[in-house]
Image (cartoon, rainbow, N blue to C red):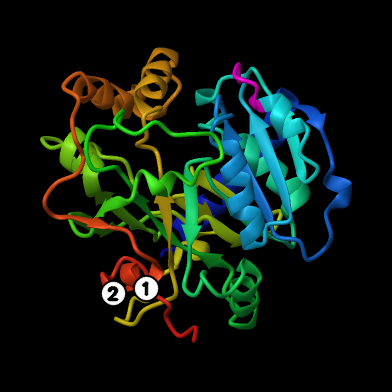
Amino acid sequence: MGVWQSYRLRLQRKRWLIRAFRKRRELTSIADRTDQIKPDDILLFSTLRNEKIRLPYFLDHYRRMGVTHFIIVDNDSSDGSLDYLANQKDVSVWHTTASYKRSRFGVDWLNWLQRKYGHGHWCLVVDPDEFLIYPFCDTRPLRALTDWLDASSIKSFSAMLLDMYPKGRLDQQPYREGQDPIEIASWFDSGNYTIQKNKKFGNLWIQGGPRGRVFFPDTPEKAPALNKIPLVKWHRKYAYVSSTHMLLPRGLNQVYDEWGGEKASGILLHAKFLDTFTAKAAEELERGQHYAASVEYKAYADSLRDDPELWCKWSEKYINWRQLEILGLMSKGNWA
């Protein structure tokens, strides 16, 4: 990268941090328990709206994994999400009625909260329908992974978003509050992915899977990005640029080995496609608060009229992380 481009990226990072500082005024603290945070705590950050049905399992999943405090922005939920979160002893929650789109889809809000509370901590940024899987997660807590990353001087950890779906119609099996969604959405595409390198930010750009196959068959370049860097040893000078797809400084996006080897990586099991999805997609399309004029939700609305099944004869049923490593979707690298 040239000196001029490097300078421009530094300026861009400073602009994002200033913007996040200004956007802090849109957040109202409802339950602030951040005084409980200890220096070595692993923190989870998330922005959500109307996800009450998902929250019990989501919180329990990450508690078992080793997350010790949750910092959450509620974007004007009307289903009881805010009250539920405010009553959780390990959750600090902020409320906002401001525009999700004008906050760069929640990135500005979380950049501010990470700057204020995340400095020096391993921070995980995920949505309520995303469940991190990493090498040895069945036998080792998240702390074991972050300790190894620290010992290896690695500051960021990538995880490809893997869309999970049921066999049959999406509304065939109702989801119950507190249930593991992967019990229903237990299938995934083992192939059907494209990867290219973003020259400006240095991150990989991954697309495809069932969303590309079913909702964007004619325009695969418009399919949602599946590359994410959700786990970072945070510094107050860092900033996410677009969701968790990429960060600044640019070096944090170097989560792969350019010389043909493998770096450790994980998977985010993405349990979007439950029986709740049709109503959620209609709500988000009406709000019009998502990326690129909500093109993703327009594609969902067009396809959902025909009650599509995401399952196909090439679908794989999820077993464990070792299966995903064998399929080449994640790697333990040199972590043994």
Q: Secondary structure at mark 1?
A: helix
Q: Residues within 10 Å of mark 1 (few under 14, many from 20)?
A: some
Name the residue rendered at 39%, 38% in the picture.
Answer: 272
Q: Which residues fall within the magenta stretch?
A: 77-81
77 left or right of 26 in image: left
Residue 87 placement, left or right of 303: right
Residue 99 in picture, x, y percent from top left:
56, 20
Nearer to us in this view, 112 or 288: 288
Q: In this figure, which residue is indicated by the disc labeled 2?
A: 326
Residue 322 is marked as 1
Would residue 15 be seen by someone viewing this image from the given angle?
no
- Say left or right for 124 vs 29: left
The x and y percentages for residue 297 are: 32, 25
Vertical placement of 25 versus 145: above or below? above
In the depicted view, which residue is nearer to us: 80 or 226?
80
Does 204 sit above or below residue 81? below
| Mark seen at residue 64 | none
Residue 331 lies, in percent from the top left, at: 38, 74
Q: Residue at x 32, y 54 (%)?
A: 205
Task: State the separation of the CA atoms marked 2 and 1.
Answer: 6 Å
Which SS does the magenta portion mostly show? loop
Residue 94, above or below 251: above
Q: Amino acid at mark 2?
A: Ile
Q: Residue at x 35, y 24 (%)?
A: 294
Is residue 78 inside the magenta stretch? yes
Provide the secondary structure element on which disc 2 rests.
helix
Asked if disc 2 and disc 1 are in contact, CB closer than 8 Å, the reply is: yes
288, 128: nearer the viewer: 128
Q: Residue at x 89, y 48 (%)?
A: 35
Residue 78: name its quadrant.
Answer: top right
Residue 178: tell me if it is visible.
yes
